[in-house]
Image (cartoon, rainbow, N blue to C red):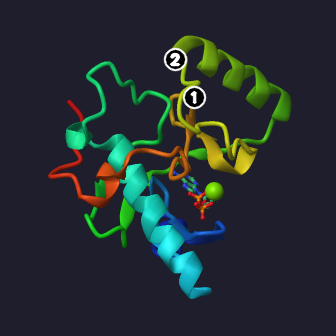
Amino acid sequence: MQSLQNLFPEIKKGSRRTVFIFDNIVIKVPRLKNWVAFIAGIRETLEERYWWCTESGVSDTWDTVFLARILWADRFGIILVAERCDPVIDSTKFEYDLANLIVEHGVQSYNFYADRKEANFGYTKDGRLVFIDYGYFGGTMDCYLGCKNIKRK
Ligand SMILES: Nc1ncnc2c1ncn2[C@@H]1O[C@H](COP(=O)(O)OP(=O)(O)O)[C@@H](O)[C@H]1O
Ligand SMILES: [Mg+2]
């Protein structure tokens, strides 16, 4: 039987996106609170799509194991569907897992840790710490061009 959460998603608001949280997926849309938030939301969603995108020009060695999986996203930055992750609840474990993530994946480049608050991370169903908000990494302008598809290799 479907749970009630499938029918009535929890709604969370970031500063740039409104996020509808279902059992297994989340749907992100730009916030309508004001024009600038809306534009910033589009930009961040496009950037997330870019980081996830096979054809983004990101090198073959790019490892997405520390990013929440994107299942679908349009090229205009209006709707993005991602895997639903569990929130960070244990700060000590979070700091430990984040340190490990940095050591293992060496993601010191770009702006990855500019907004490294707990609300921007989550745990996947198999217990990995991942970025759930990666729209602020500071990619190249390629994200504005729109990638042809978002399938990973
Ligand atoms: N993949 C996800 N799984 C579970 N919750 C999420 C996910 N993505 C976002 N959220 C929730 O929505 C909130 C806002 O999303 P976020 O991507 O950080 O938007 P913003 O860019 O506006 O900060 C997050 O702090 C988190 O609570
Ligand atoms: Mg955020």
Residue 126 at what x, y percent from top left? 51, 29
Q: In which quadrant of the rendered image does the C terminus lie?
A: top left
> Dot 1 corresponds to which residue?
127
Residue 14 at what x, y percent from top left? 64, 66
- Name the residue nearer the viewer: 60 or 21: 60
> Dot 2 corresponds to which residue?
105
Task: Mark 1 or mark 2: name the one nearer the start of the chain.
Answer: 2
Q: In which quadrant of the rendered image does the N terminus lie?
A: bottom left
Q: Residue furthest left?
A: 148
- Name the residue nearer the viewer: 65 or 32: 32
Query: Tag 2: residue type?
Result: His
Residue 87's disc is none
Q: As displayed, is residue 79 above or below residue 132?
A: below
Query: Tag 1: residue type?
Result: Gly
Q: Horizontally, is 69 left or right of 20 in the view?
A: left
Where does ligand 1 appear, by image quarter? bottom right
- The residue that appears at 42% across and 51% down in the rendered structure is 48
Residue 9 at what x, y percent from top left? 53, 71
